[in-house]
Image (tube, rainbow, N blue to C red):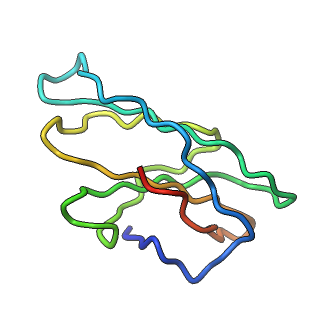
Amino acid sequence: MLASVGSSLKHPFILSLVALLAMTSSATAANAARVTLAWDAPASQTTVLSYRVYSYEKKTGATSARKMSDVTGNSLTADNLSTTTSYCFFVKAVFQGNVEGEASNTV
């Protein structure tokens, strides 16, 4: 599934992706790394059903973003990343009816 940062579906707040831990070597593969993304829940009266995490390679740009995962918590660890590739990540809140909010800041 491809996604773009500019979505026509808007919600009254923007998530802020607040923490990106440094890439660390993975024990499972010599050329793999992982990052942990964490964000604060929005201060909104609207119920967030889940969060949708997207990633893309920095060299290809946000229009090539792909959905990594839907999560119900406020963090995600991305595994098996290449240590020679620069990645970007953003998160969108998902509301009733599978409506996505605006994208968080990109890290």
- Check the image and report above or below for 34 versus 9: above
Foreground residue among 59 and 92: 59
Q: How many marks?
A: 0
Give the side of residue 92 with respect to residue 35, left or right.
right
Give the x, y percent position of residue 97.
71, 71
Q: Residue at x 53, y 78 (%)?
A: 7
Give the side of residue 75 with respect to residue 43, left or right.
left
Give the x, y percent position of residue 52.
54, 55
Judged from this view, the residue extending furthest toward the top is 27
Foreground residue among 76 and 83: 83
- Quarter of the view holding residue 94: bottom right
Foreground residue among 64 and 72: 64
Q: Residue at x 63, y 55 (%)?
A: 15
Give the side of residue 62 with respect to residue 33, left or right.
right
- Check the image and report above or below for 98 versus 78: below
Give the x, y percent position of residue 60.
21, 65
Judged from this view, the residue extending furthest toward the right is 45
Judged from this view, the residue extending furthest toward the bottom is 8
Quadrant (top left/top right/bottom left/bottom right) for the N terminus: bottom left
Q: Residue at x 44, y 36 (%)?
A: 20
Q: Residue at x 42, y 56 (%)?
A: 54
Give the side of residue 80 with respect to residue 12, left or right.
left
